[in-house]
Amino acid sequence: MNEAAGPRGAEALADGRAHGEQAGAARTAMIQVRDACAYYGEKQALFDVSIDIDARSVTAFIGPSGCGKSTFLRCLNRMNDTIEGARVTGSFLLAGRDIYEPSLDVVELRARVGMVFQKPNPFPKSIFENVAYGPRIHGLAHSKADLEKIVIGSLTKAGLLKEVQDRLGEPGTGLSGGQQQRLCIARAIAVSPEVILMDEPCSALDPIATARIEELIDELRENYTIVIVTHSMQQAARVSQRTAFFHLGILVEEGETAQIFTNPGDERTQDYITGRFG
Amino acid sequence: MPEHTVKAFAEELEGLGQSIATMGGLAERQLADAVTSIERRNLSLAERTAEADIEIDRLEQEIESQAILMIARRQPMASDLREIICAVKISTDLERVGDLAKNIARRAERIFESHPQRAMPAFVRMARLAMQQIKEVLDAYSRRDTAKALEVWKADAEIDAAYNSLFRELLTYMMEDPRDIGSCTHLLFGAKNLERVGDHATNIAEMVYYLVEGEPLAEQRLRLDDTERGRPVEPEQPTSA
């Protein structure tokens, strides 16, 4: 851990500067959504959501249960396609390209927009195979050495390598909850995504494992666009640069995290984050 | 604003506001007693006033520990966070007001050595302005009234002017009769303390504004001046030069 702290610390500093400068300049949107609506059968779950999600930055979605934040997150890599009766309208651009266009390869999309779930869900395979699976099916590795390089690189980026390097052949399900979640992050990273979606990634973890994941998220934003759904306001305040508040399927407010948590613009946001919702 | 889901938190916030109100009442009282003791040459009142400051200090510490506990336990956000931070800052200002009242009272004996009677009306006038400022700003706090807070903020210039005028007046008396230099100097220090009370009132006014609006007062006001009048304006100085 300590060996890595030096260069990592320096990078974090450089990134902090870069981000500070970026705040003054124009934001670069990785994802642009306009007038998104989502339906489960007859029931409308999202109403005209429009938002720009910054590249190489963490955006948090907050809101009470059933507010549509997870539904919206799942629109971003077409996970809702897998749900019977679910329907999505509106325009979703990923790096300028419509992700709902019929010719688009959904498998490829989900490689570009990876996802980490609430409950760690490693495959019932070895640690190595968990990470190697994606690059293999996407044909990203041309040799065994190539594949090993990707696996080791991904485990390193996910901050897990040191803990598992002696037992890469052991089952991923034998790891602790926090380690399993980092394994899932390594698995997502292995296919070189541009965006990583996280749906309450820490809600099944203890505070120490949560802190590790949060630290990891902060490091990952240097190279990836991260969208995180969380029930913990404190977590949103800690890890994100921008925060979006959803309520009853409507995007009520979106803005800089520092602003949202000290002086939100909308009364509903204020009531929610101060715990005044009836 | 709707009720907090966690009732105990709402009660704690209310308790914090009440502590500020109590502390503000004490500070007002201290200041009034200090000024009255000087005005009426009442040494025993002056001594009692200097001693009573301890209660204000105790309340400040109580507010501070209440606030620390609330931050640790509730992780307040948005208006709740501002509420707590402002209570801590306001209590510091009120504690200073209590100290200043104590300082004034402590000078009583030396001011009485040769009571500079002629300067008394100007001193009392200035004291009334300072007390008025404290009273108004505490009202603004309890009613969350930003318009009133802004008035207090602007009115500080009057106290500064009163101080400058009293300073010149006392200087004249000292030149007229050097035997009065001792007591006049102490009265001047007392006036300086009143001027500082005014500054604390403006600090509190800024806190009330931030508490309600979520933005600092100075920044906001400059922008308003800029856009409403359509021209840049020199920033007003709330504190004396």
Image: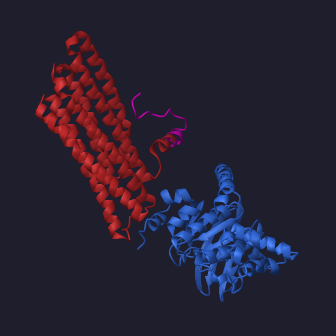
Q: Position of residue A49 (x, y in %)?
A: 62, 70
Observer-nearest of B150 and B65? B65
| Colour mode of the rendering | by chain
B86 left or right of A182 in image: left
**Residue B106 in sight in this render:** yes
Residue lying farthest bottom? A84
Q: Which residue does the image show at 55% across and 62% down from the upper left?
A: A238
Q: Which residue does the image show at 67% across and 57% down from the upper left?
A: A8
Q: Position of residue A155 (x, y in %)?
A: 71, 71
Residue A92 in which image quadrant: bottom right
Observer-nearest of A254 and A70? A70
Observer-nearest of B217 and B78? B78
- In this picture, which residue range is highlighted in magenta? B223-241
Task: Report the chain shown in blue.
Answer: A
Q: Is residue B155 above or below residue B179?
A: below
Q: Which residue does the image show at 76% across and 65% down from the upper left?
A: A95
Residue A170 in which image quadrant: bottom right
For the N terminus of chain B, give its image quadrant: bottom left
Task: Report the chain shown in red.
Answer: B
Q: Is residue B194 above or below residue A238?
A: above
Q: Position of residue B19 (x, y in %)?
A: 27, 54
Q: Is residue A47 above or below residue A42?
A: above
Residue B184 in which image quadrant: top left
Q: Which residue does the image show at 45% across and 59% down from the upper left?
A: B78
**Residue B145 in sight in this render:** no
B122 left or right of A161 in image: left
For the C terminus of chain B, give its image quadrant: top left
Query: Number of marks in the image?
Result: 0
Is residue A211 found inside the magenta-colored segment of the image?
no
B74 left or right of A88 in image: left
